[in-house]
Image: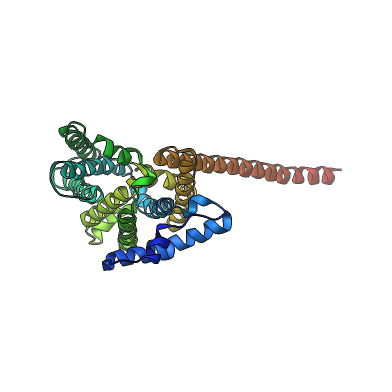
Amino acid sequence: MTSPPSLGVVARLAPGQASPLDRLMRVVLDDLWGAVLDGLAGITGIDMLGFPFMQRAYLAAICVALIGPLVGSFLVHREMAMIGDTLAHSAFAGVAAGLFVNATFAVTVAPLLTALIVAAVAALLVQTLVDYAGAYRDTSLAIVLTGSFAVGSVLVTATDGGIAVGINAYLFGSLATVSRVNAAILLAMSAVVGLAVTAAYRPLIYVTFDEVGARAAGLSVSRYNRLLAVLTAVVVVGAMQIMGVILVAAMLVIPVAAATPVRGFKRSIGAAIGAGLLATTTGVTVSYGYDVAAGGTIVLVAIGIYAAAKVGVRARQRLSRRYRASTATTAGSTPAADGRDDGE
């Protein structure tokens, strides 16, 4: 069974005047990624791999699986997992702001862009409240979370609920929200996050595991805290396209939690990314096949992976204890037998 032609094929057959950015998007999304999935669709007979919107959804899923656990590994070890939920609510306010501007004024603003701006500002605000207002971290998170959601709810109702329909896809996640432009933006976000973490890896490790020592060594802890917060905002905004605002924080936490039995920080990051890839790609596939929310499906798969990892660790620990007990019993019985032989 052959797959239907993708938009990339159509674009190549009838190219028009395009900007350099459009040409770059066509090369990456159509000539490279689209061609790969078109080929897989032809080989496997899985038609959905040839659908342009599913190609973009899988690309978004892979990007989210890469950058979510990458940043989440630092957050979880710093006990900052809830900042993802806070920034998700801030992103909701940003989406509402973008949709409000589009509905009220004669301009067109990408909700993804306004969400990124608002989430980044919220991330910096959280750290500012901690550094300069003397607020505890959980207090600052609660203030920003509730304030952001309040702003979002006011903007939604300010247009008599006219933008409520448009915002639902961002709340619960939708495969259809990953447009060509959004996919390109997410790719750029992923590259920025990856490069930033790579460049600041050692200082981030130092600040994560020994903040006092990092200060004593002359590192600007506040600067790296802000960097981590802004990177979290970027991940949240990128992931909310398929995860939804309500569940986006899960990709920062659950894959990392599933990888905690792995020894070594770098290896645990790799394991977390692997768990994230399995969760997102499986979730997107099931979401399309059964017409259910992508975000909820991905989270349920991720929780299943986490549960399987925990069960596997417990089973291994029990087998290890039984083996040690059996070895100790065997070792203890041998001298006794020798003692009886000597006595005889």
Which image quarter holds the C terminus?
Answer: top right
In the depicted structure, whether residue 141 falls above or below residue 232: above
Which residue occupies the extreme front position in the image? 14
Percent across and percent down for residue 247 are: 36, 39
What is the total number of numbered labels drawn onto the structure image?
Answer: 0
Percent across and percent down for residue 48 are: 49, 50
Quadrant position of residue 323:
top right
> Taking 16 as reference, is 310 left or right?
right
The way the protein has been coloured in the rendering is rainbow
In the depicted structure, whether residue 290 falls above or below residue 241: above
Asked whether 288 or 88 is in front, the reply is 288
Asked whether 202 or 158 is in front, the reply is 158
> Taking 43 as reference, is 107 left or right?
left
In the depicted structure, whether residue 281 falls above or below residue 156: below
Percent across and percent down for residue 40 are: 53, 58
Residue 22 seen in render: yes
Which residue occupies the extreme right position in the image? 344
Residue 199 seen in render: no
Percent across and percent down for residue 168 are: 30, 37
Asked whether 169 or 47 is in front, the reply is 47
Give the residue drawn at x 52%, y 61%: 39
